Each structure stands twice: as structure tokens, then as C-alpha cells.
Image (spheres, helix red, strand yellow):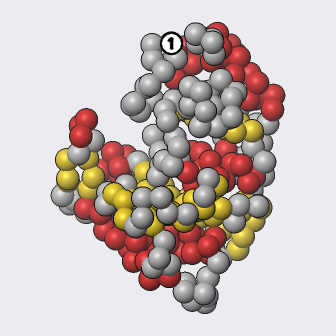
Amino acid sequence: MISMSTASDAQLALGAAQAGAAVVRDMYGTSLSRVEKSGGDFATAADLAAEKAILDVLRTARPDDAVTGEESGQSGAAGAERRWLVDPLCGTLNYAVQNMLVAVNVALRVGSRTTAAASADPFSGEVFWTDGRSARVRGDGVDEELSPSPGSRLVDVNLDAPFPNAPDFRAVSLLAAPGFAERFRPRVVSTTLAVAWVAAGRRAAYVTDGDLRDSVHFAAGIALCEAAGCVVTGIHGQPLHTGAGGLIAAADRETHAALVELVREQAPADR
């Protein structure tokens, strides 16, 4: 077994995500206290315990790196060159009602690039991970290359707030668009595990509104999609994290172009 102190950044991301996933899995179905947050959001005791497990791994192996945790906030220098982005339980509401659709996300941003990331499914035991060059899924200790595919026609749409481009663009409106129903089948799983599924060929695409720069929720999934060769842009097809923001991550250019056109029909980019 590789020591975390000598592990590569990608191995460390994978190990940290596995540590958090173990906590999430072990606490599933137990009576969990809640910590109320703003806007009706909340964290559970499992979110807090999983984040602690992840941070223990990261801080032991990379004590000089900065960290942004979903629950604990920022630590380290504000302008640090190396910063870990940690989402210990993406899909907290799912988890709180004993729905197993959740993810544990860990990503490393070096400068302006995400150079290593992992997104773990606590219940399947799979960990989707990347070293910034290729993307793989680890299951039962075996790694397989991720291969995007539009074949399922399944498009996951994030309907959770905030909606910074409303009323011009609302992700929910895609679901009612005739062009969408003719070509795609909608899914709403309410966890960024679905972004990793695009990289793995289990979703044709993923769409969300929002400013996702340095997002603890999305950094890992975006890195996986980019490394796997998906088409990844903002909602108008613009470079990621520019203009109106948002995200369209698609398995291929044809799927991406169709989704950009559907967005344009309800919200022209120059509006």
C-alpha cells in the first residue's frame, strides 16, 4: 500500500475521497444531527465527519497546501498556488432521506488548473479519478479508462439553486423544450456524481447554471470530464468560467451542440 506522504497528488485525491466515502457509508441510515446553513440548506453529522476524515489525510500528506472545505471553509493562504477543494457529501438531502445517490469530491487546483481529482461513490465502492491527463474508475482495486458515450441519451439537469441567469435561462425549462424531449431523456439525481457519469459514458451530458469557479461541488467532476475527452463549456458554449458561466459537459460534440442550441432558444448569449 502506498504511503500517503509519498503518494502522487492523484493518488492522494483518490485516497482522501475513499476515506470520506468510508465515513459516509458507515454512517448511512443512522440517526444524524443536522447543522442548519443559509437558504434552508443543512449539513449532517456525516458531512462533518467525512470532511474531517478527508482533511486528516490531506493535511498529514500535504501540510503546506491550502484547503477549501464545504463545511469548514478556507484554511491556508488566500492566494495559495496549491488548494484542495473538498465536498465531503454531495447530495446531503438525498443522504438524509436514505437515498444512496451521493458523491464525495476531492480536487486539487494548482494555479488556475485542476491537476488531480477524485469523485467517490460510497455505496458502489467506485472512485472516478484523474491525474489531469487521463481519467479512470477504480473498482475492487482495478482501474479502467473512462470512455464518454452519448448512447444513453440521458442528460442530467441540475435544478438546485442558485439560478444567476434567470429569468433568461432556467435549467428546468430545458425539460419542457420540445427539442429536448425529441432527442434526450432527462434525469435529475441531485448530486455531482452525475458529472462523473458523463466521463464514464453513463450520461450523455450534464447541464447546470451557476458560477462554478473553484466550486467544491463541481471541480472534481469537471476535471474528470475534461481528462476523459468530453466537451466542457459554459451554458452558451463559451469557455468555462467566462461570460454567463454555468456548465454543459457532453460526451461528444453533437450532443454538446444540440444542448447549446436549446439553451440559445430560451436565452440568446447576447441578451
Circle 1 Cα neighbour tier, 10 Å, few/some/many (<14 / 14–19 / ≥20) = some
> Where residue 134 appears, x then y in whole percent?
76, 61
Indicate left or right for 167 with 128 as reference.
left
Residue 155 appears in view: no
Q: Residue at x 27, y 41 (%)?
A: 41
Residue 150 sits above or below residue 15 on the image: above
Residue on which the image places disc 1: 168
Res. 47 image quadrant: bottom left
Q: Residue at x 64, y 55 (%)?
A: 113
Is the C terminus in the top left, top right, bottom left or bottom right quadrant?
top right
Residue 265 appears in view: yes
> Where residue 133 appears, x then y in whole percent?
76, 61
Q: Secondary structure at mark 1?
A: loop
Indicate left or right for 161 with 33 as reference.
right
Residue 159 sits above or below residue 138 on the image: above
Q: Residue at x 31, y 60 (%)?
A: 72
Residue 171 sits above or below residue 176 on the image: below
Is the N terminus in the top left, top right, bottom left or bottom right quadrant?
bottom right
Pick the residue in front: 69 or 174.
69
Residue 83 sits above or below residue 231 on the image: below
> Where residue 55 appears, x then y in whole percent?
40, 72
Pick the residue in front: 63 or 223.
63
Name the kind of residue labelled 1 in the image.
Asp
Res. 129 image quadrant: bottom right
Q: Residue at x 75, y 52 (%)?
A: 228
Indicate left or right for 128 with 53 as reference.
right
> Where residue 107 appears, x then y in whole percent?
55, 60
